[in-house]
Amino acid sequence: MKELVAYILQFGSLNQQQIDLILSKAQEREIKKESYFSEAGKVSVEVGFIVEGIMRVCYYNNKGEEITKYFIDENNLVVDLESFENSICSSAYVEAVTDCKMIVFSKKDWEELLNTIIGWDKIVHKIINKALILKVSRRSPLVSEDATTRYLSFMEMFPNVINRVPLSYLASYLGITQSSLSRIRKNIR
């Protein structure tokens, strides 16, 4: 749980009593590879923090093709924010790409922390802002670059992810076919 505490303290200060309250609400959980943390068509009711492993956010397009939107690795929060905050069905899946060790908060406990700890809402807001900025900065270049450049950018942005995710997920994220990705990888080596 020390990883979670270190992560939170990057965004604001808390006293030991507040930290203890947060940890009292936290539950450790293991999610097996290819299992879902949250699913499309269901309301997201948990916030997770990845201690170990990689998750991906994906959806199915109107042709029934699975599209990977992005990856989330260690020391990051995981939540379908729109579904969680508005109690609406999610449009995406959050799936474990590898076996994951997580720290999880129920919606009830998360809201209790928001209502109890002074300043917790500001910390959460900063965490969400950082995640959104990071997501946009990682996605934006992928729109305008050629496939090889997108792959090289991905390698640079996600050095801890590149060799831990299936090529099919990576190709989907990059918006290319798996055979194109294989050619790109072969030409780079």
Image (cartoon, grey):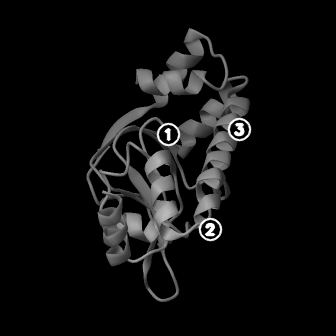
Q: Does the image show residue 140?
A: yes
Q: Position of residue 141 (x, y in %)?
A: 62, 59
Query: Label 2: how many residues lie within 10 Å, few (<14), some (14-19) or many (20+)?
Result: few
Please name the residue that numbered disc 2 is placed on.
143
Instruction: Report x, y in % for residue 158.
Output: 45, 47
Instruction: First in sequence, mark 1 or 3: give its number.
Output: 1
Nearer the observer, disc 3 or disc 2? 2
* Image quarter (top left, top right, bottom left or bottom right) of the C terminus: bottom left
Q: Pointers 2 and 1 in contact (CB under 8 A)?
A: no
Image quadrant assignment for residue 39: bottom left
Residue 130 in the image, given as x and y percentages of width and height: 66, 40
Q: Which residue is mark 1?
A: 76
Measured in 3D between alpha carbons, the distance from the residue under mark 1 to the one under mark 3, in whole angstroms, is 14 Å
Q: Which of pointers 2 and 1 indicates the residue nearer the eye?
A: 2
The three-letter code of the residue at mark 1 reads Asn
Given residues 172 and 58, the one toward you in this image is: 172
Choose mark 1 or mark 3, whichever is in front. Answer: 1
At a point 61% along the width and 11% down the height, the residue shown is: 15
Disc 2 and disc 1: Cα gap in Å?
Answer: 24 Å
Q: Secondary structure at mark 2?
A: helix
Q: Which residue is mark 3?
A: 125
Q: Is residue 114 above or below residue 42?
A: above
Q: Secondary structure at mark 1?
A: loop
Helix, strand or loop at mark 3: helix
Circle 1 Cα neighbour tier, 10 Å, few/some/many (<14 / 14–19 / ≥20): some
Measured as percent of width and height from the top left, residue 35 is found at 31, 59
The quadrant in which the N terminus is found is top left
Count every numbered label the image shows and give the total.
Answer: 3
Does 69 appear above or below 119? below
